[in-house]
Image (spheres, grey):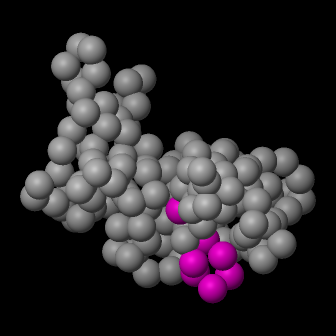
C-alpha cells in the first residue's frame, strides 16, 4: 500500500525489518512503529496511510526536493511546526504532481521538515489562490 500511495520502494523505506504494529479491536493493523517511534497510521476508511513525524522524516530523506513537499514561507514556520494549518498564501512551492487529498510533507524554504498532513487543494489552486487552507497539518515537529 505504501508503494501505491507514495511511490515504488517506499514500503521498504517506511517499514524496515523490526517494525511493530498496534492492532485495532478487530485485529487489523492500525499503527506502525519503529523503535517506539510512530511511522504511520492506517486509516480505517480506505486503508491509506497517514504519516507520523518519523515516517515523514524517512520520506523526506528518500525524495529529493521538491517531491512530495509543500514549501511554506519563513513567516509560517513557527505555526506550521506547532501543528497549525498551512494556508495557501504562505505556500511558496509545491510538487506539481500531487493531488488534493494526498499525504504531504511540509518544509521550510531551506527544506527543513516542519510537519506532515493532508493536501486540501490541487497544486494549481494553491498557486492561484491567496487565501484558504492548503494543508490540514496533522503533526508538527514542535508539537507537544
Q: Is residue 95 visible?
A: no
Dominant secondary structure (helix, strand or loop) of the stretch shown in magenta = loop
- Percent position (x, y) of residue 109? 68, 81
Front in this rendered view, residue 134 or 53: 53
Farthest residue to the bottom: give it. 110
Front in this rendered view, residue 77 or 118: 77
Magenta stretch holds residue 130 = no
Residue located 28% across and 21% down the image: 24
140 lies above or below 25: below
Residue 86 lies in quadrant: bottom right
Residue located 33% across and 54% down the image: 37
- Percent position (x, y) of residue 139? 56, 50
Residue located 24% across and 55% down the image: 34
Residue 69 lies in quadrant: bottom right
Start-end of magenta stretch = 105-112
Residue located 85% across and 57% down the image: 129
Amino acid at each position: 500500500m505504501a508503494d501505491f500511495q507514495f511511490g515504488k520502494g517506499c514500503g521498504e523505506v517506511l517499514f524496515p525489518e523490526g517494525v511493530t504494529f498496534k492492532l485495532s479491536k478487530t485485529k487489523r493493523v492500525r499503527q506502525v512503529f519503529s523503535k517506539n517511534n510512530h511511522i504511520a497510521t492506517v486509516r480505517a476508511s480506505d486503508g491509506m496511510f497517514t504519516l507520523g513525524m518519523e515516517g515523514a522524516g524517512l520520506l523526506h530523506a528518500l525524495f529529493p526536493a521538491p517531491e512530495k513537499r509543500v514549501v511554506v514561507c519563513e513567516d509560517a514556520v513557527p505555526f506550521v511546526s506547532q501543528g497549525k494549518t498551512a494556508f495557501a498564501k504562505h505556500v511558496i512551492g509545491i510538487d506539481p504532481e500531487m493531488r488534493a487529498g494526498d499525504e504531504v510533507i511540509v518544509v521550510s524554504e531551506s527544506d527543513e521538515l516542519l510537519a506532515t498532513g493532508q493536501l486540501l487543494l490541487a497544486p494549481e489552486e494553491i498557486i492561484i489562490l491567496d487565501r484558504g487552507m492548503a494543508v490540514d497539518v496533522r503533526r508538527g515537529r514542535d508539537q507537544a
